[in-house]
Image: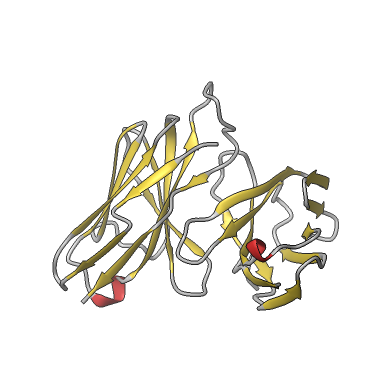
Amino acid sequence: GAVVSQHPSRVICKSGTSVKIECRSLDFQATTMFWYRQFPKQSLMLMATSNEGSKATYEQGVEKDKFLINHASLTLSTLTVTSAHPEDSSFYICSARPRAGGPHDTDTQYFGPGTRLTVL
Amino acid sequence: QKEVEQDPGPLSVPEGAIVSLNCTYSNSAFQYFMWYRQYSRKGPELLMYTYSSGNKEDGRFTAQVDKSSKYISLFIRDSQPSDSATYLCAMKRTSYDKVIFGPGTSLSVIP
């Protein structure tokens, strides 16, 4: 099946620092990648949608200057949490939708394993 | 009213039982329906994907969609302890639309 990786899997940082999380589609090209946030025992909340080569579209209530998203290639998207604070501590998950013409279904999203961010 | 509702559980069943997981939704425009399984501290894994109403079977899993009732179900036959996880229903209006997730149901299968 389609494989999506995230790095790092876990990060602990001090308040005020910035943290970058990478999301890679390993065996397919992804025209669209999605970033989600998940609090304990809650569902996934979509933060933003990014298309390769264009600016990300952020959901209502998500600060685009705080959560910087870059989708520089068809296999890589990054989420940078700038000036992180304890309330940003959460589980961040990316997903990728395959590009048409590849081996995987373009109707579905494939999820990464998630990154647990803890801000002290 | 939330767009997608799901009983959060927790649901606890003995090994070998048939499990029924359900979601209701309010937006009649949803046409694509999915079930994801999420183990603790992991990303969601796609289990079933259906378009419009009807049934779909894959091994021990059966997904049902009743658009007239705005109700979807996932059945797990011969449940195993390894099925213990949170099950998220998800849906979208069009192929390229964003996915809306339910809150998830926590399932424990007791050996």
Q: Quadrant of the C terminus of chain B?
A: bottom right
Q: Quadrant of the N terminus of chain B?
A: bottom right
Left or right relative to B5: residue A55: left
Q: Residue at x 51, y 74 (%)?
A: A41
Taking A53 as reference, is B33 above or below it? below
* Rendering coords of residue A25 (x, y %): 40, 37
Left or right relative to B50: residue A71: left
* Rendering coords of residue B42 (x, y %): 47, 59
Left or right relative to A69: residue B59: right
Judge by depth and name the residue closer to the eye, B50 or B25.
B50
Q: Residue at x 38, y 45 (%)?
A: A5
Q: Residue at x 44, y 38 (%)?
A: A32
Taking B77 as reference, is B11 above or below it? below
**Type of colouring:** secondary structure
Judge by depth and name the residue closer to the eye, A16 or B67.
A16
* Rendering coords of residue B77 (x, y %): 81, 58
